[in-house]
Amino acid sequence: MQRMTAPKFPRRYSSVTTGFNFHQIWARNPWVVAWWSAAFPGFGHLLLGYYTKGFVLIAWEFFINTKVNLNEAMVYSFVGRFEAADDVLEPRWLLLYIPIYCYSIWDSYSKTIELNKHYLLAQSEPEPIKLFAMNGFTITLLDKRSPRRALIWSMLFPGLGHLYLQRLPSGAFIAVSCIAISYYAHLVEAVVLIIRGSLEQARTIIDPEWFSFFPSMYCFAAYSAYVMAVEMNEMYEREQCQYFRTKVQPPDYQLL
Amino acid sequence: MHIIAAFEPSDDLEMAILALERDGIQKHQIAAVPMESTAAKPSLQHSIYRGSGNGAFDAAAVIGTICSVLGASFGFDLKWGPVLWGLIGLGIGALIGYMLNKLFANRYNEATPSSSVKASVILIVRCQESESRKVSGILRQFSAISIGTLNGREA
């Protein structure tokens, strides 16, 4: 809606500022995006900014994975107990997993290339970048953010890095997901036990099916928080330079 | 005369301009020149198919995640358990990814701009000799990186 007020509707632009979210695209490596989709279907789409699709895919992954017991089977396979893996897999759901898994990888790969082209074209002309948005509930200000601080917050608890960068939808989604995972995996209890030094007890209390969601979730949240902060600063600098070029360069300025 | 200062793009820079205007420097006496980096830009093909991001960080995150998942899985059979082995895996994997990138990426990636080169803005303020101390004081206060003066002769 903000775009309608611009004097001429731009064909291509690469960021949108709303009260709830600063949304931005940039040139990404399609293999890295495809890898995130492979680690956890939906992450590639979240990284690209397709939140709706990403949320649906992640919710589906939680559902189907716990139905199939895929994570548990994966843990057993990695340590070589193939019969145990075979036993926990649920044949009634198993095959439904595969097509959507493949689709999410392929789709995020090809969308990255599309968006990269769009981004490069949008960048080649002066595009409108909205610095500030405010509504009855909240405020978003395109500002400089420290990538390292975003990384540290995200590593303390996934989702906080996104919230620090004013990404309310993805931040809230990741935080809520991690709270659910921690609860069902008995992660918090295990951490307390580890701090107290009872490693054996901690190992047995953890639920392998739920805990195996955590590493990729954790790494993805930290990774995306860091790269988003870097790109957000880049966008900030572009906006400010555009402003200086048009508004703080008097036409009759004489240097000598 | 002119006071010339280099800034990083930031809110401080705009605050400096505001402070100057409040202290009686006219708008037409101030000019800001954003400096463009001379580092070679990656080709369009490279940007489309490899992105323009930080390859070392990408590699560290990808390999780190793989090793973290593997570490957590193996950890269920090891004494220290999945949480600690997951974290150990993450640390080792991130290090491996970073080093692999440093070893192999440089060969075909030499043209990418150095990330240590910061974008900067040069601010030029025309003022009377008597105002120069005040102006450079304001610029210093709003974290100018460096400040210089240019003494033009009045015609």
Image (spheres, coloured by chain):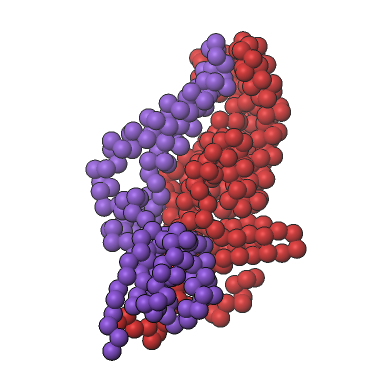
Q: Position of residue A61 (x, y in %)?
A: 63, 37
Q: Farthest residue toward the right?
A: A136
The residue shown at (57%, 77%) is A6
The residue shown at (53%, 43%) is A149
Say which of A39 and B110 sits in front: B110
Say which of B79 and A241 sits in front: A241
Asked whether the viewer can see residue A100, the reply is no
Question: Can you say whether A198 is above or below A106 in the image?
Answer: above
The residue shown at (61%, 65%) is A132
Q: Position of residue A166 (x, y in %)?
A: 61, 53
Say which of B23 and A61 sits in front: B23
Is A55 left, or right, of B55 in this rendering? Answer: right
Question: Can you say whether B18 is above or below B143 in the image?
Answer: below
Asked whether the viewer can see residue B117, the reply is yes
Q: Colour of chain A?
A: red
Question: Can you say whether B2 is above or below A32 in the image?
Answer: below
Q: Position of residue B140 (x, y in %)?
A: 43, 61
Q: Which chain is purple?
A: B
Number of marks in the rendered image = 0
Q: Position of residue B155 (x, y in %)?
A: 28, 89
Is B129 left, or right, of A45 in this rendering? Answer: left
Q: Quadrant of the N terminus of chain A?
A: bottom right
Is A24 left, or right, of A32 in this rendering? Answer: right
Q: Quadrant of the C terminus of chain A?
A: bottom left
Question: Can you say whether A168 is above or below A118 in the image?
Answer: above
Say which of A118 and B60 sits in front: B60
The residue shown at (27%, 43%) is B106
